[in-house]
Amino acid sequence: MAHTNKNATSVVIARQPIFDRQYQVYGYELLFRGAGHHPKADFSHFSADVATSRVINYAFLELGIDRVIGENIAFINLTRSFILNDEPIPAKQNKVVLEVLEDIEIDHELLQGIKMLKQQGYTIALDDFVYHESLKPLIEMASIVKVDVLMLDEDSLREHVRELRQYDIKLLAEKVETLTNYQLCYDLGFDYFQGFFFCRPDVIEDTPIPDNQFVLLQIIQKLQQPDVEFKDIDELISKDAGLSYKLLRLLNSAALSLPRKINSIREGLVILGLKAIKTWTTLIVMSEIDYTPKELLDYSLIRAKMCESLSAAYDCSAESGFMVGLFSTIDAMLNRPMAAIIDPLPLSDESKQALKHHEGDLGALLQDVVRYEQGLWPDMSEQPVSLETFSEQYIQAVEWAQKTREVI
């Protein structure tokens, strides 16, 4: 296992998307903590203030925030000491939303600190907010209020919305874990949504897959056959000029960084080999699926690259790791149960069990990658991979996914 530069990973970082009402990504909340050798290590010696300072300096100065959030906005948690110490924030005002944590003591000194940040042009958000009349001065300085929908029943949620709509603020529903939660919050008029509801299929039994989606699934099925030959792939691609164009663009993109320009699919086969061409063609076909939100493919790409990079530590093949990560959101893309999509595909039993039940070494790898991206770091399995390594591979996978999405 490759060891990571300790200086470069003093912060372990991930991101969680925040969507607007059009299901487009508005920004990403940065999830972070001090790094240790293993996901279950004790991080209590890192204070919240140290962690806040580290993530801001690491993300914006050392790492380069664009590698993690692209052109989007970063939501960052601030502690009381960070606000009061008037520490400089190495980020442009239009690139960050500063979140005031729910457990911060509210007094005149804190309000003055927040007021100063607002006067500097920063957007202020209130995290895990529970409405109380005494918090009115804080609400009046905020632009966004984040409401934890898991902490409130439906009546309480409706009451919160009624109270907060008196103010000139945007409402963000966080910890939205199901499509039912999302629909309720949408109907209540929330402006933004955060949680993993979009990764779960909205399954309607006995609803057939639309014809255009079914054709793409048939192509994926053909590509996964163990005896598929290049002439088969060439025949599939040649029927769709769009697929040919996208594959050539991908072969010549920064995502692959090949040493010279590729002028034909056949030339790409000679350089990369049949397995690689099969993999990239599968990726492009998946990008043609009509799904919402588009963030689902980003998750598939990031998981695929991470599973590929970490596969050796889990005694898995890199190719199997990549494909399992790539297929990990196909149930949400097609709004079908994973088994209904995966069982007909000519994948190995190991891959099928990994996708359906997170079983076996491949399943453990996929599960740890998913837990990492969700910030569930203490729940990751006892594997000989440090959290620093996961962080490094995550950042590289995000950057690779962004480059890949530009050409497919």
Image (spheres, rainbow, N blue to C red):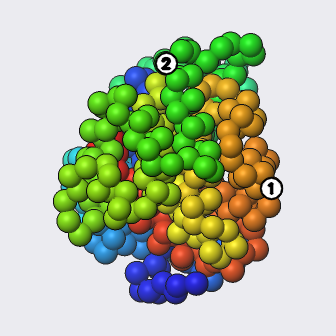
Q: Is residue 145 depicted above or below 179 in this figure?
A: below
Would residue 123 appear left or right of 275 to someone viewing this image? left
Are there few (<14), some (14-19), or many (20+) residues within 10 Å of tag 2? few
Q: Considering the numbered disc 1 on the image, is that residue within a helix, a strand or a loop? A: loop
Q: Position of residue 362 (x, y in %)?
A: 71, 61
Q: Position of residue 217 (x, y in %)?
A: 57, 30
Q: Earlier in the sequence, mark 2 or mark 1?
A: 2
Q: Position of residue 130 (x, y in %)?
A: 60, 37
Residue marked by disc 2: 212
Quadrant assignment, res 22: top left
Q: Is residue 180 visible?
A: yes
Q: Name the residue nearer the viewer: 353 or 141.
A: 353
Residue marked by disc 1: 359
Are there few (<14), some (14-19), or many (20+) residues within 10 Å of tag 1? some
Q: Name the residue nearer the viewer: 145 or 34.
A: 34
Q: Quadrant of the N terminus?
A: bottom right
Q: Quadrant of the C terminus?
A: top left
Would residue 18 appear left or right of 205 to someone viewing this image? left
Q: Name the residue nearer the viewer: 137 or 175.
A: 175
